[in-house]
């Protein structure tokens, strides 16, 4: 029986993946590294720590990882505050359906707490969630299952009672490795993402409701 719905944030609740790609690009550009935005899609769903460890090694950056992440954080907060982005189509209605069904809700994002809160406050979604959890609190980021397992534990649930909604290949793999049912959300702004390991894939939240999610573990198909 499903008791909780766990949402990824970036690319699921808000079309923010382009902002993340731009944030990484601008941070690297400030240190003389020119990387096209298109090259950033492979890192969708990963933590700042993991990405900047890779960037530091690949581009031979002299700055500390902590200082690079701090620079990026300032850029990201500015980008989200200046953005006119709203919630993804149908996501608010889906959240209302989930809450009406009496299910628990959580955000489990690879983003930092300041960015998560900035986004949820901008979208007016804070009140819809029982728990907000950042992947920066766990040792291993997506595609490792840690962020979802920790979220599940904090919700006082088991993997079998949780459904994850994800838009990235790394996120779907993390959910599957956590032993959770997963709904893939095909968001074109997230780039080409392999969501084939999800129980079902949709491209519009307006086509589903809480009842669909409750019975999702029985499904294994592509839904449009």
Image (tube, helix red, strand yellow):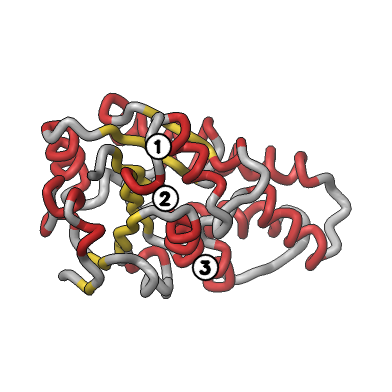
Q: Is residue 60 above or below residue 76?
A: below
The secondary element bearing badge 2 is classed as loop
For marks 1 and 2 on the same chain, the one whose residue lies earlier in the sequence: 2
Residue 85 or 89: which is nearer the viewer? 89
Disc 3 is placed on an element classified as helix
Q: Residue at x 67, y 52 (%)?
A: 27
* Residue 191 on image: x %, y %: 42, 70
The residue drawn where x is 28% and y is 32% is: 104
Image height of 35 relative to 137, above or below: below
The image shows residue 69 at horizontal and vertical percentages of 69, 43
Mark 1 closeness class: few <14, some 14–19, many ≥20 residues within 10 Å: many
The mark found on residue 179 in the picture is none
Specify whether residue 22 is in view.
no
Q: Which of marks 1 and 2 is in front?
A: 2
Q: Do the residues labelled 1 and 3 touch (CB within 8 Å)?
A: no
Mark 2 crowdedness (10 Å alpha carbons): few <14, some 14-19, many ≥20: many
Q: Could you tell which of marks 3 and 2 lies nearer the N-terminus?
A: 2
Q: What element carries label 1?
A: helix
**Residue bearing the label numbered 1:** 119
Q: Residues within 10 Å of mark 3 (few under 14, many from 20)?
A: some
Residue 150 in sight: yes
The residue to which callout 2 is attached is: 10
Q: In the rendered image, which quarter contains the C terminus? A: bottom left
Q: In the figure, residue 34 lies in which quadrant?
A: bottom right
Mark 1 vs mark 3, CA separation in Å: 20 Å
- Which residue in the protein does label 3 denote? 41
Q: Check contact, mark 1 vs mark 2: CB within 8 A.
A: yes
Residue furthest toward the right?
Answer: 62
């Amino acid at each position: 029986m499903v008791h909780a719905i766990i949402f990824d944030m970036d690319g699921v609740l808000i079309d923010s993946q382009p902002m993340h790609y731009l944030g990484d690009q601008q941070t690297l550009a400030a240190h003389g590294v020119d990387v096209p935005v298109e090259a950033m899609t492979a890192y969708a769903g990963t933590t700042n720590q993991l990405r900047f460890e890779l960037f530091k090694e690949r581009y031979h950056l002299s700055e500390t990882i902590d200082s690079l992440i701090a620079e990026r954080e300032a850029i990201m907060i500015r980008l989200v505050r200046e953005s006119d982005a709203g919630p993804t189509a149908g996501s608010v209605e889906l959240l209302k359906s989930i809450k009406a069904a009496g299910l628990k809700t959580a955000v489990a994002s690879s983003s930092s707490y300041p960015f998560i809160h900035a986004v949820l406050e901008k979208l007016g979604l804070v009140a819809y969630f029982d728990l907000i959890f950042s992947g920066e609190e766990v040792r291993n980021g997506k595609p490792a299952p840690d962020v979802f397992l920790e979220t599940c534990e904090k919700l006082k649930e088991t993997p079998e009672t949780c459904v994850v909604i994800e838009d990235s290949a790394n996120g779907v793999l993390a959910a599957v490795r956590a032993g959770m049912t997963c709904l893939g959300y095909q968001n074109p702004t997230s780039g080409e993402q392999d969501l084939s390991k999800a129980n079902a894939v949709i491209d519009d939240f307006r086509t589903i409701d809480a009842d669909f999610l409750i019975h999702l573990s029985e499904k294994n198909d592509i839904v449009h």
